[in-house]
Image: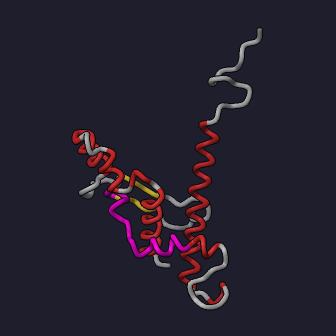
């Protein structure tokens, strides 16, 4: 895969899995509050390119060797419908169902690379969710963030 392919796949995956980057969800959420919507559009850089990056993606998990992606406008503007078909095909790929005749080794190299990238993106997202859950959990032996009093 080229760097451009990588950027397009990562951007599309993030739009598909992160509601704050979906334009329709964003517009619907702030439909009744035009002032807040205008501020949000400015902070997310929805309709223009900002001087400095407003969003960034740095690969973790097995994507560490890939380039950091800086977005000077909202990630939602970098959604490529072409890649959604492949991203949505990933569950079938995991089950051993392939789009081309033959076994895994008969599949095009770019397709296998793409499925590996999607696998890594899913694992990365799951890992972030687990880490967030751990940080938000109340430590053992504490009630409401405090140690119980000894009576």
Give the percent coordinates (x, y) of residue 51: 27, 54
Q: Is residue 70 above or below residue 137?
A: below
Give the percent coordinates (x, y) of residue 65: 56, 67
Relative horizontal placement of residue 26, taking residue 141 as reference (left or right): left
**What's the residue at 25%, 39% (across, down)?**
33
**What's the residue at 61%, 76% (across, down)?**
93
Q: Residue furthest top?
A: 151
Q: Is residue 12 above or below residue 126?
A: below
Residue nearer the viewer, 7 or 93: 93
Give the percent coordinates (x, y) of residue 148: 71, 17
Which quadrant would the C terminus be assigned to in this image?
top right
Segment colored magenta? 72-89
Give the percent coordinates (x, y) of residue 88: 51, 70
Relative horizontal placement of residue 55, taking residue 51 as reference (left or right): right
**What's the residue at 60%, 74% (across, down)?**
92
Residue nearer the viewer, 124 or 49: 124
Relative horizontal placement of residue 5, taking residue 64 as reference (left or right): left
Was residue 53 drawn as part of the magenta stretch in this picture?
no
């Amino acid at each position: 895969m080229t760097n451009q392919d990588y950027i397009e796949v990562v951007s599309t995956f993030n739009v598909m899995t992160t509601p704050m980057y979906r334009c329709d969800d964003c517009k619907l959420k702030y439909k009744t509050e035009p002032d807040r919507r205008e501020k949000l559009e400015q902070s997310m850089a929805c309709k223009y390119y900002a001087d400095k990056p407003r969003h960034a993606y740095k690969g973790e998990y097995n994507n560490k060797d890939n380039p950091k992606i800086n977005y000077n406008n909202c990630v939602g503007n970098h959604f490529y419908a072409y890649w959604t078909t492949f991203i949505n095909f990933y569950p079938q790929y995991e089950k051993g169902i392939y789009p081309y005749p033959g076994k895994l080794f008969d599949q095009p190299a770019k397709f296998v690379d793409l499925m590996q990238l999607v696998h890594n993106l899913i694992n990365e997202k799951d890992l972030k969710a687990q880490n967030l859950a751990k940080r938000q959990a109340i430590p053992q032996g504490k009630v409401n963030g405090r140690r119980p009093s000894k009576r």
